[in-house]
Image: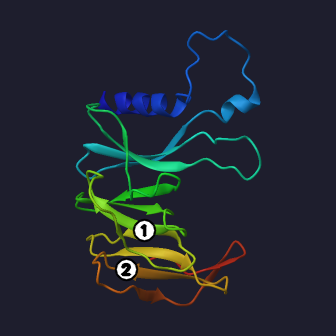
Amino acid sequence: MMVRSLVLLLLGLALAPDNTLEGQPQRTMVPEDIATVRLAGDVQLSPDGRVVAFVVQEAPRALRPGVSRRAGVWLIATDGAGTPRRVIVAATDSAADSFSPRWSPDGRSLALISNHEGAPHVYVLPADGNGPARRLTWASEGVDGYAWAPDGSAIAYTAEDPPSPERRTSAAPPSPDAKPRRALRSPVKLTGQSRAPAI
């Protein structure tokens, strides 16, 4: 029952348009209407099963090439109590994207990728989504993806090294004064791209 309610709630949030159609005459749906729908995805259940983190892609402000949807990480309790709320990485992130939420193995922290400082980087914050977010990565071209170590002591991430197209994998302990260290150096060819194997 709880899972069904959660799915219905997420679908309702995702499918609710930014403007209401109440009081407007009914009309046939056109392709442009699809762009006004909010999309929900990348659902991540907390280790204790009490909270869901998910990504909502907002409808674009304009329907033209080069204008993309803005993405944000949201949290909601699985029991349906409260309302969904957006995770704020920094006061300056109102025009930025955040995505790829991942719970720490112990459930006390939530990591995500945000581009509010330019390139996309991994940030970690308390599991309730409140409090200051700490930036964990400093790759000049930003981060492509990441994963928690099973014991929560480190986060491994992939990033592109400029100017080479070679991809490398690094591990960064979540301590603010720890330095990232290179985990793997030799790339493996995958679908025409040079990538390091996943850890």
Q: Badge 2 local density, few (<14 within 10 Å), some, or many (20+)?
A: many
Residue at horizontal 30 percent and vertical 69 percent from the top: 150
Element at badge 1?
strand
Where residue 115 appears, as percent x and y from the top left, is 51, 63
Where residue 175 appears, as percent x and y from the top left, is 27, 78
**Amino acid, disc 1:** Val
Colouring: rainbow
Disc 1 marks which residue?
Answer: 122
Marks 2 and 1: in contact by CB < 8 Å? yes
Question: Could one spot residue 20 in this view of the protein?
Answer: yes
Image mark for residue 136: none
Locate the C terminus and report the quarter of the image it occupies.
bottom left
Q: Is residue 180 left or right of residue 32?
A: left
Q: Is residue 52 left or right of residue 190?
A: left
Where residue 140 appears, as percent x and y from the top left, is 54, 80
Disc 2 marks which residue?
Answer: 172
Q: Badge 1 local density, few (<14 within 10 Å), some, or many (20+)?
A: many
Residue at horizontal 31 percent and vertical 27 percent from the top: 1
Residue at horizontal 56 percent and vertical 81 percent from the top: 196
Element at badge 2?
strand
Rounded to the nearest angstrom, the CA distance separating label 1 from label 2 is 10 Å
Q: Is residue 92 above or below residue 198?
A: above
**Amino acid, disc 2:** Ala
Where residue 43 appears, as percent x and y from the top left, is 43, 46
Residue at horizontal 48 percent and vertical 31 percent from the top: 11
Q: Quadrant of residue 182?
A: bottom left
Callout count? 2
> Which is nearer the N-term, disc 1 or disc 2?
1
Question: Could one spot residue 198 in this view of the protein?
Answer: no
